[in-house]
Amino acid sequence: MADSEPPMTNFPVPDVEELPADLRERIEEETEEAGFTPNVFPAMAYRPQQARAFLDYHDALLEETALEREEIEMIVVAISGVNDCLYCVVAHGALVRVYTQAPRLADQLATNHRTAEVSEEHRAMLDLAVKLTEEPAAVEEADIETLLDYGFSREAVWDIGAVTSFYNLSNRMAHLADMRPNEEFYEIGRGQR
């Protein structure tokens, strides 16, 4: 396991063993599932009550959704690229590679979703996510209608907005904390040559 950088540099990283039991258990579960501790967990645990709310909302976005997991991850990477968020581009880029089995897609999405190898439907989805990120007041009913025309349900459009909004928060906290991506994320889903 690579531990070359701390989870964040601008705030003290809490000792996992000293965290409240529920957060400690969550971090242990995530560590077991991933094979390493994603840095977002100890970093966000700096403020335990806020970490609980953050994780609960994250989980709700994954559990109550009209989107496929790969679509969620594509949104995260596209807007994280717009926001220059290294942690989320790298961590969620790994998840894009895993869920789409497309090793180049995350890099394309982080650089410019408009030229990425995605369907027209997914490009429209990402257009809304990026617009909501860059100029939220400019989002209008026509943007929603475009996605409905591509076959997205109203619930899916809501979920696109919710994922976008949550990860804009996450991107900003990652910048504030100077959250560092785990070395492992860089390799996940890239395959061996």
Image: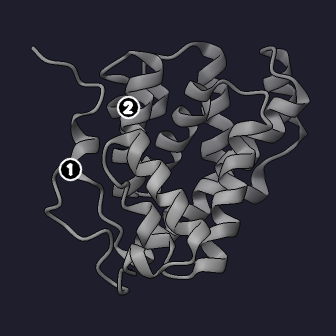
Q: Is residue 30 above or below residue 52?
A: above
Q: What whole-number distance in Å separates the C-alpha atoms at marks 1 and 2?
A: 16 Å
Asked which secondary structure carries label 1, the reply is helix
Q: Residue at x 34, y 84 (%)?
A: 10
What amino acid type should be assigned to the residue bearing mark 2? Ala
Q: Residue at x 60, y 64 (%)?
A: 169
Determine which residue is flagged by label 2: 106
Q: Residue furthest left?
A: 193
Left or right, 49 with reference to 92:
right
The crowding category of the residue bearing disc 2, from other C-alpha atoms within 10 Å (few below 14, some 14 to 19, many at least 20), is many
Q: Where is residue 55 drawn, in percent x and y?
A: 63, 59
Determine which residue is flagged by label 1: 183
The crowding category of the residue bearing disc 1, from other C-alpha atoms within 10 Å (few below 14, some 14 to 19, many at least 20), is some
Depth check: give the residue in front, 12 or 137: 12
One can see residue 82 in this view: no
Q: Where is residue 104 drawn, in percent x and y?
A: 30, 22
- On residue 90, which mark appears? none
Left or right, 187 with reference to 92:
left
